[in-house]
Image (tube, coloured by chain):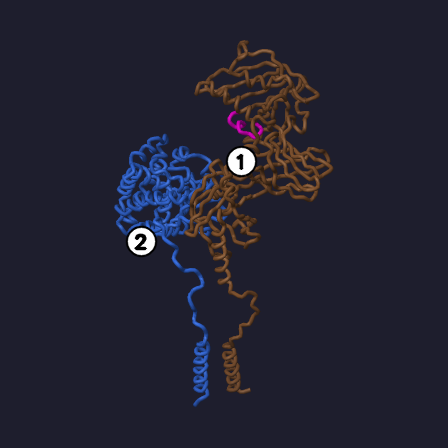
Chain colours: A brown, B blue
Amino acid sequence: MKIKNIFKFLIFALLAMQLGSCNDNTDAEQKFDQNPTDRLNAQKKELSDVLLTSEHGWKAVYFTDNTQLGGFTHLFKFSSDGKVEMASDFDGDTDAYESAYSVELGSAVSLLFTTKNRIHLLSDSDNSPTDALEGKGYKGDFQFLYYGQENGEIIFKTNRSFQELRFVKATEEDWENLAQNVIMGENVVGGEERPLFRLLETNDGTTTHQFDFIFSEAPRFASANSIETGYAVSYNMGIAYTPTGISVSPAVEVKGQKLTDFVYNDTDGSFTATGTGGVSATIKYTTKPLILTDDYKGLLDGNDFKVYGYISPFLTNAITTSTLCKELLDEINASLPATQQLTRVQLYFNDGGYNYIEYRFSGGRPTLYHNVTTSENAVDKTIVLTHDSWQTATALIPAPALLKKIDDEFTNPKGLYVKKENFKVVYSNVVWTFTSASSNFRITTYALN
Amino acid sequence: MKITKKYKVAILAMTLVAFAGCSHEDQPTESQLDLTKPVQSDLDKWITTNYVNPYNMKVQYKWNQNTVDFNRFLYPPQEDKVKPVLEIIQKIWLDSYKVIAGADFVKKIAPREIVMVGGVNRNTTGTITLGLAEGGQRVTLFETDYVDKTDRENVKQFIHTIQHEYIHILNQTKPYDENSLAKITPSGYTANWYASGDAVANEEGFITAYARSNINEDFAEMASIMLINSKEEYEAILAGIESEEAVAAIKSKEAIVVKYFKEAFNIDFYALRDEADKNTTAVVNGN
C-alpha cells in the first residue's frame, strides 16, 4: 500500500470516530431518577425538614461503646435558624442550652452540632471515666450520618465509629422528666442504706441463674458473672437511666428473649425486666456476698505474717470502698486539725504472733494501735477481731473516742468477710477487701507484703 | 496541490468539525450545590471586621472535621467564649506586632486560618497539646473554653500557644541561626522531654521542659516565653536557676532570638516584649 493510501484511510477513520463521538447516546441504565447531586440535595432537605417536624423535638439514648460504657439520654429541639436547644442526663445539670447545628453535605448528608453543647461532654479528651479511656473521653461523636427514617424515627450512624443511633420523637414528659434520670442514677449506684452486695438473677420460666453484679458509676457500665461452677455465662452491659428504671445495651438475653428495659422497685431497690412466658431478669440486693471465699483462713493464727493497708487517697474512691466507710473516714478527718489527716488504716496478722490494727496520721499526730485477737466464724466464713488493748508506740492508752466508730466496724462480733479482688487500683499491689458481716462497711486495702 | 497540502486542508476541516461538533450541547446551568452564603451572625460580622478584612485571616470556630484530627476526642468552642478569646489574641498578639513591626507585618506573614477547639487535647501518654501550626497556614488553638481574662497566668498560658506557633511561622519564612543554637546545649535535647518539669529543664539551660524536644521548639519556646512574660517576670525565672552555666546558656539563646528578630525583620525584640506585656496587663485589667 502506498503511503498516500495509508493517510487516506487514517483520515477517514479519524473522521468517522469524530463524527461518531457526537452521538448523544448516553443511555447507560439509570438506576435513579435523579443524579447524585440532586439526590444528596434532596436528602439534605429531607433531613433539615424532618428535624423541624417533631413538636417537642427528638430524643436519643446514645450508647457510645456498649462494651465499656453506658448510655446518655439527649433531648434536642431544632429551629430553622440553625439553633438547637439541648439537654442531657450526662451529669446533674439537665437544663436545656442553646447552640448551633448544621446539616452538612459531604460524602453523605450529616447532622453536625457545630458549637459546644451538652452532647460534646461525651467527646472531651480530658474527661475519661476509666484509665483505659485516657485521652478518649466517653468516645462520643457529635456528627451523625443520615441513613433515612423508619416508623417516625430518624436513623443515623455515628461519624467515627459507625454505630446506629436513632432519634425518636420526644414528648413533653421527656423534657419534664429528664432530671428524674439523674435521680434514678443514684438508685443504680445504690443508696448507702442498701446492702453492699448485688446480683442479677435470670429466670427462663423454669430455671434461675445468679450472677455477681457490679456497677461502675462513671462509665455507667455493669458486669455480671455467673457464680455457678460449670455455667460460664457473663452479661456485661452499658446502662442508661430512665425515669422509671434503666435500659441496658447489649440486651440481657434469656431464652432467646432480649430484655432491655428494667423497672425500678423502690421498696427493695431492685430492677426487673419482664419478658413473656415467665422469662425475667432482676438486679437485686443481698446482704451476703454471693460467693463466700476462704481468703480469711490465711489470716488466722499460725499463718504467715500479712499486712493489708488502706492508703488515702488512692483507695478512698475505689468502687469497693463503701459509702459508710467513706463517711466514717470523713468524720474522723473533719474532727482533726486542718494539718492532720488519717492517712492509713493497716491490718496486721501474725506479726510475731500478734494481730493489730494500725491507725496512721499525717501532720505529726502519733500512730495508734489496737491490739486484737482473731477467731474464725466457719459458718459465715468470716474472721472475727476481738478487742485486747489500745496503745501508742510506747504506752497503753484507753480506747480513743476519735476512732470508736470505725474501729467498731472492724471488731464487730459477726466478723469480716475477706476477699482477694481481681482488680487493681493505681498501684500494682493486689487489692483485698474487708467487709463487715453486720453492716454496710467495706474497706479496700493493698496487700503490702 | 501537493499531497501534503491536500492533507493540510483535510486536517483543518477535521479540526473545524471537531470544534463545531459539540456546539449543540447544553450549556452548564446554575450550580446544583447550595451556594447561598450562610447568614452572618453578629459574631461572624465581628470576625470579618477584625480578622478577615485587616489580616486576611479566617477564624473557624464552628466544627469542621476536616481541620481537626479525626481520631481525637475534641469539641468546638462554646459560642459565647469565642469573641473574648479573639479579643485577647487581637490585643496581645496582633496589636503588639502592629505597633512594633508595622501595620502590615502580621498581614504579610500570618497563618491564614485560626481554628478554635473548646476542649483539652489530651494525648494517651497523658501530655497535653496546647496548639498546632500546620505548614505555616493554619494555627489550631485548644482549650479556648477555659480562657479566663481576669487571670494573668491563665491569659499568659493561652497566649503562649499562639506566640509559640507564630514563632514557628516566622522561622518558616526566614531561618534563624540554627548552628549557633545547636551548639549551646547540644546534649540536652530528648524525645522524652515530658518526663521532667520546667525546673529540671531550667537547670540544664532550657527555658521550659518542652524546649528540650528539639532546637526548633527550643527557639520557639525561648522567644515565646520572653514574649508572654514581663522583663521582671523573665528575670525572676532566671534568678531562680541555681546553675550559672544554665543561666549563661539561656542568655546565649536569648541573644540568638534578639539577633534573629533584628536581622530578619528589623524588629526590636525587647520593645515587642514590652508592648506585649503592656497589652497583657491591659487585658487582665479589663481595658
Prevailing SS of the magenta stretch:
loop
* Helix, strand or loop for disc 1: loop
Q: Position of residue A398 (x, y in %)?
A: 54, 10
Quadrant of the rendered image containing residue A210: top right
Residue B170 shows in the view: no
Q: Position of residue A379 (x, y in %)?
A: 70, 21
The answer to whether residue A330 is above or below residue A209 is above
Determine which residue is flagged by label 2. B53
Badge 1: residue crowd in 10 Å (few <14, some 14–19, many ≥20): few
Instruction: Please give the range of residues in magenta.
Output: A311-321
Q: Quadrant of the N terminus of chain A?
A: bottom right
The answer to whether residue A389 is above or below residue A204 is above
Q: Amino acid at mark 1?
A: Ala
Q: Amino acid at mark 2?
A: Asn
Q: To which chain does the residue with label 2 belong? A: B
The answer to whether residue A301 is above or below residue A250 is above
Badge 2: residue crowd in 10 Å (few <14, some 14–19, many ≥20): few
Q: Position of residue A285 (x, y in %)?
A: 63, 30
Q: Quadrant of the C terminus of chain A?
A: top right
Q: Of A130 and B99, which appears nearest the observer?
A: A130
Observer-side mark, 2 or 1, equals: 1
Determine which residue is flagged by label 1. A218
Task: Give the CA separation, mark 2 to mark 1.
Answer: 47 Å
